[in-house]
Amino acid sequence: MDQSELLEAALLAHPSVARLDGRFASYLPGRRVDGVRTDDRRVGVAVVLHPGRPIPEVVDELRATVIAVTGNRPVDVVVADLEDP
Amino acid sequence: MAQTTSTKPDTANVPARLADDTAQGKTTIASSVVQKVAGIAAREISGVHALGGGVSRAFGALRERIPGAGTSTTSGVSVEVGEKQAAIDLDIVVEYGAGIVDLARAVRRNVITAVERITGLEVIEVNIAVNDIHLPEDDEDQEPAQSRVE
């Protein structure tokens, strides 16, 4: 499994994440993984959240989730939208 | 420090540093996020009949008739979002009978509280334009607008 798919699964498992946003993506043979991009130096994720909790708290948790998968690289988090309540 | 209190940082009161472009990475909050939070907070105040006014409200009504498009939560709300601060403009329609000055103050307070709590951005201003007043008889020939919040 590609690292981007592992990241996708880990992010979607978080209760505040509604879906990933397609403003950037990882392109794999046969499919694309929206909202995740990685290179040697940085990781970028774009998420759409359920409203309710303070976003900085959620982002901190997501960053920890990402680091658990990718190792210690800077993680750029884009909160692209909130799901309609 | 010799104190034994929790060392967990109090993130509830200190606005988080957004776009914290350090070793940890950068956090970006899209303006549509701020728009939605501000729109929900404004509607929560009783006496606010609707958001929008003039052109944007008419446009919102048009959008509602497009199947699947849903209500535009962001009509009547425009925002400017920087790295750490946000400025918000609201167009509102008030219920007849509401004291507009007090109502505007309550809306402003609720919007600031909600946006700062949810996004961690500092709200530097909330400009409120009252575009119309909603009279009870306006509802006579149409279904009463279904308000999500009382």
Image (spheres, coloured by chain):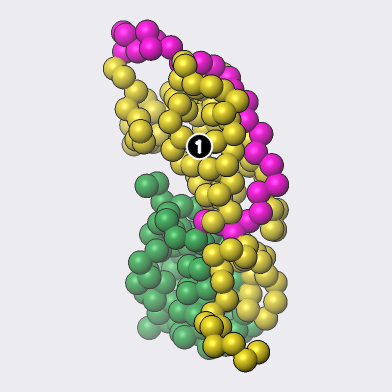
Chain colours: A green, B yellow
Q: Which residue is mark 1?
A: B42
Residue at position x 65%, y 39% from top? B126
- Horizontal side of A62 relative to B139 (left or right) equals right
Q: Within 10 angstroms of label 1, few (less than 14), some, or many (20 or more) residues?
A: many
The stretch drawn in magenta includes residue B126: yes
List x then y, in percent, for residue B20.
67, 70
List x then y, in percent, for residue A42.
62, 79
Q: In the picture, residue B106 is in which quadrant? A: top right
Residue at position x 50%, y 37% from top? B42
Give the residue furthest to the bottom: B2
Work out which quarter of the rendered image holds the N terminus of chain B and state it.
bottom right
List x then y, in percent, for residue B127.
66, 34
Q: Chain of mark 1?
A: B
Indicate whether B113 appears above or below A9. Answer: above
Work out which quarter of the rendered image holds the C terminus of chain B and state it.
top left
- Horizontal side of A33 relative to B76 (left or right) equals left
Which type of secondary structure does the marked residue at label 1 adopt?
Answer: helix
Q: Amino acid at mark 1?
A: Ala
Indicate whether B14 appears above or below B63. Answer: below
Point out the stretch of residues depicted in magenta.
B118-142
The stretch drawn in magenta includes residue B119: yes
The one nearer the camera, B22 or A8, is B22
Q: In the picture, residue B117 is in which quadrant? A: bottom right
